Image: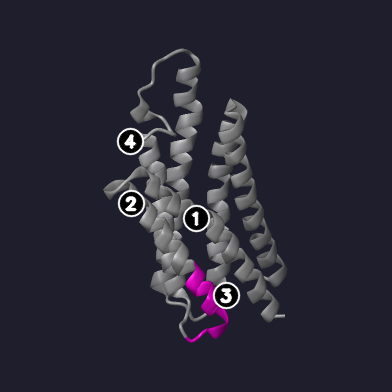
Amino acid sequence: MNIQNKNMISYIGIATCIIYFLVVVGFLVFKTDTLLTGWEVVTILSAPVFLLILLSILNDTCNCNKTWRHLAIVFMSCTIMLTSMAHFVNITVTRRLLSDGYKVPDYLQIGKWPSVEMAIDYLAWGFFLGLAFLCTAFAIDKANSKMKNLKYTLFVCGLLCLAGIIGVVLINENCWYLAPLGYGFGTIFICIEMIKLNRSFV
């Protein structure tokens, strides 16, 4: 993968995170169905972008540990499948039932807690994405000084994601906001580090 493509993936990653937060804030302010649908569509589409970001990083680690590399890809694939399933079901089934006047229990709706769909989404973005970040960090060779900052950033993001889901399960739902801090804002920093790294290879 050439540097131009790597930079493009980084910029797409930054743009995706910004769009995600804009849609979320828009929904929280205006509470419209259109923005809710936008939120869910952006969430589904953002998961493959995260996979591309991790693959771009792993592509730079020629001497990386193959086991960690494979685990990172497996865990990120789990994130894609689970979040896509949760939001697709919510868009096509749950919200349609609600619009038709059916009383769907809170435990079957996204945005409610405890909820089956939210649990699946938390598992995707908290547990599996957290593990994907950590495995990518561990895949980077310790001797690679150029990637040291990126390695630490991935490690912190992974811990925040895991702290979010562990907090939800064991402490309080509000602990979840540690996870978006890791995969949302954290990914922006990851992409910035990637751009800096690509410049050093020029």
| For the residues bearing labels 3 and 1, Cβ distance under 8 angstroms | no
Which mark is nearer the camera, 2 or 4? 2
Which numbered disc flags the more N-terminal residue, 2 or 3?
Answer: 3
- Which element is circle 1 on? helix
Q: Observer-nearest residue: 127 or 185?
A: 185
- The chief SS type of the magenta part is helix
Residue furthest out toward the left: 170
Which numbered disc flags the more N-terminal residue, 3 or 4?
Answer: 3
Which mark is nearer the camera, 3 or 1? 1
Residue where numbered disc 2 is placed: 167
Q: Give x and y (percent) for residue 116.
A: 34, 35
Which mark is nearer the camera, 3 or 4? 4
Above or below residue 165? Residue 55 is below
User: Is residue 116 highlighted in magenta?
Assistant: no
Residue where numbered disc 3 is placed: 60
Q: In the rendered structure, which amino acid carries the disc numbered 3?
A: Asp
Residue where numbered disc 1 is placed: 181
Any part of residue 61 in sight: no
The residues tagged by marks 3 and 4 sit, at their Cα atoms, a distance apart of 40 Å
Q: Quadrant of the N terminus?
A: bottom right
Picture quadrant of residue 60: bottom right
Q: In the rendered structure, which amino acid carries the disc numbered 1?
A: Leu
Any part of residue 40 in sight: yes
Q: Give x and y (percent) for residue 18.
A: 64, 50
Which residue is at 63% across, 76% downward? 197
Above or below residue 197? Residue 72 is above
Residue where numbered disc 4 is placed: 114
- Magenta residues span 143-153
- The answer to whether residue 171 is left or right of residue 91 is left
- Which element is circle 4 on? loop
